[in-house]
Image (tube, rainbow, N blue to C red):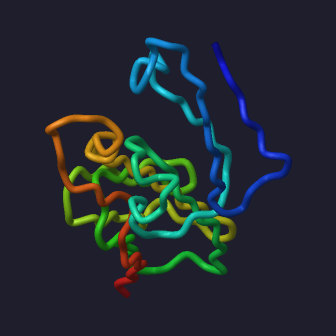
Amino acid sequence: VTYSAVLPRRAELPAEVSLTLTEERGYAGGAAIDGPVKLVCGAGRYTAGDWCRNDALRTYSGAAWYGRDFTLTKKPAGRVTLDLGEVVSTARVLVNGREAGLRLTSPWRFDVTGLLQEGANRIEIRVCNTTANIFLSSPTVYRGDTKAGILGPVRIEIAE
């Protein structure tokens, strides 16, 4: 059985969706739903920071894309480094659709020099957290740090 909830208009900020089940006798707790609940979310606005502080994402384990468009009037002459500050847990960076790198641990720095261009540019960052968050929603002895996302501060450094 598939249930669908569609918001009447695009939500720019995080939206809360609730699912209420009336259980049949004998199907309670984890037996009421026989598989994972899949959330399909469209584009929206979310700033850097800990996902776990947002109730909607507190128990989310998976990936999220961050993106930023910007324009350069001229390409920088020196080396350009994107420094994400602190990230939990992995980060993959694309600049104008080209791979800048994947980091599984700090330092969360990426050389983006050869990927920038005059005019329009786009930086995309895919962050994956750990399974610690999903364990908050199930009875288990497995626990871990639930911080997740780009914690920052994010900086672009240009060495002339």
Residue drawn at (51%, 57%), measured in percent from left and top? 95
Q: Position of residue 29 (x, y in %)?
A: 41, 26
Residue placed farthest to the right in the image? Answer: 8
Residue drawn at (25%, 35%), measured in percent from left and top? 139
The residue closer to the viewer here, 41 or 3, is: 3
Residue placed farthest to the left in the image? Answer: 141
Q: Is residue 114 above or below residue 2?
A: below
Q: How many marks?
A: 0
Residue drawn at (42%, 78%), measured in percent from left and top? 156
Q: Is residue 157 left or right of residue 19?
A: left
Place residue 42 in its image quadrant: top right
Residue drawn at (20%, 35%), measured in percent from left and top? 140
Q: Position of residue 142 (x, y in %)?
A: 16, 39
The residue closer to the viewer here, 136 or 101, is: 136
Q: Is residue 56 left or right of residue 53?
A: right
The residue closer to the viewer here, 69 or 13, is: 13
Q: Position of residue 81 (x, y in %)?
A: 36, 72
Q: Is residue 8 left or right of residue 91?
A: right
